[in-house]
């Protein structure tokens, strides 16, 4: 198994990558933004993606998106082919794309919005912390990417303040002096507080 920085030669896998992302979205019943092959190929050509290959067989993929003139970066489209799941491959891909993002955008804040507990754990292990959507990029081209998500109506009804996804952020300027155990405890404590505050505010305003 190889996990490498994708390039133009990997464009032959764009179709299966998009199909795998779409099928995963249906199975989970949660929001995963759909992407077209042309978009995936552009990421490969720009060196903003990593791909996992078992010989010549596609196994997994993830790409980088930059927002607000490179101030924010997102690792998006993390996907593992069904035949290669439950092998720890997603974690390996996440680690490679995270390191690649730090190299290409050393001063950028790296963020994630996800509904998946497994992704939240991976993010936590890398140093991400849960945040409100207000702490993420305000670049509307990012939020427009959520239009293909089945939960997009939730995002619009709350004026982009909350959705079913959880926002998580890695800030390279913040030095982490906590132990791994303290990090996990504080992360999930803050995550709980964020959710409680948002829902209490929603109830107080009488919004649905």
Image: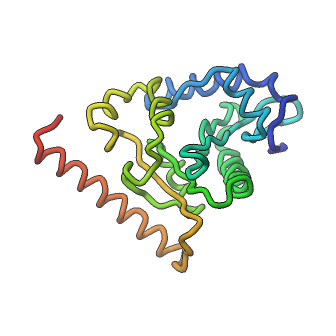
- In this rendering, is residue 138 above or below 149? below
Quarter of the image with the C terminus is: top left
Residue 44 location, quadrant: top right
Residue 151, horizontal then vertical, whole percent: 37, 29
Q: Nearer the viewer, residue 45 or 138?
A: 138
Q: Quadrant of residue 197?
A: bottom left
Please state which of residues 121 and 171 is positioned toward the viewer in this rendering.
171
Q: How many marks?
A: 0
Is 39 rendered above or below residue 187?
above
Whether residue 72 sits left or right of residue 150 in the image: it is right
As displayed, is residue 115 above or below residue 16?
Answer: below
Q: Is residue 28 visible?
A: no
The residue nearer to you, when weighing 22 against 203, is 203
Q: Position of residue 92 (x, y in %)?
A: 71, 51
Place of residue 32 in the rendered image (x, y in percent of width and height, measured from the top left): 51, 31
Residue located at (66% from left, 39% from top): 85
Residue sitting at x 31%, y 57%: 194
Q: Can residue 46 be seen from the camera position used here?
A: yes
Residue most toward the front? 69
Q: Residue at x 17, y 51 (%)?
A: 200
190 relative position to 144: left or right: left
Residue 108, percent from left and from top: 60, 56
**Figure quadrant of the N terminus:** top right
By what rule are the colours in the image chosen? rainbow
Q: Residue at x 68, y 54 (%)?
A: 105
Residue 133 relative to residue 44: left or right: left
Vertical order, 84 against 75 (above or below): above
């Amino acid at each position: 198994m190889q996990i490498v920085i994708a390039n133009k030669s990997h464009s032959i896998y764009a179709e299966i990558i998009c199909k795998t992302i779409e099928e995963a979205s249906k199975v989970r019943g949660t929001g995963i933004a759909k992407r077209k092959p042309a978009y995936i190929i552009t990421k490969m050509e720009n060196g903003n993606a990593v791909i996992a290959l078992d010989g010549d067989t596609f196994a997994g993929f993830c790409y980088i998106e930059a927002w607000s003139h490179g101030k924010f970066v997102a690792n998006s489209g993390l996907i593992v082919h069904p035949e290669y799941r439950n092998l720890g491959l997603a974690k390996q891909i996440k680690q490679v794309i995270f390191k690649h993002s730090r190299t290409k955008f050393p001063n950028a804040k790296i963020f994630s919005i996800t509904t998946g507990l497994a992704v939240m754990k991976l993010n936590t292990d890398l140093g991400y912390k849960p945040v409100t959507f207000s702490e993420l990029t305000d670049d509307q081209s990012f939020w427009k990417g959520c239009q293909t998500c089945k939960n997009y109506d939730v995002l619009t009804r709350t004026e982009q303040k909350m959705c079913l996804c959880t926002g998580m952020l890695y800030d390279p300027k913040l030095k982490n002096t906590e132990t791994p155990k303290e990090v996990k405890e504080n992360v999930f404590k803050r995550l709980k507080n964020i959710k409680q505050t948002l829902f209490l505010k929603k109830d107080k305003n009488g919004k649905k």
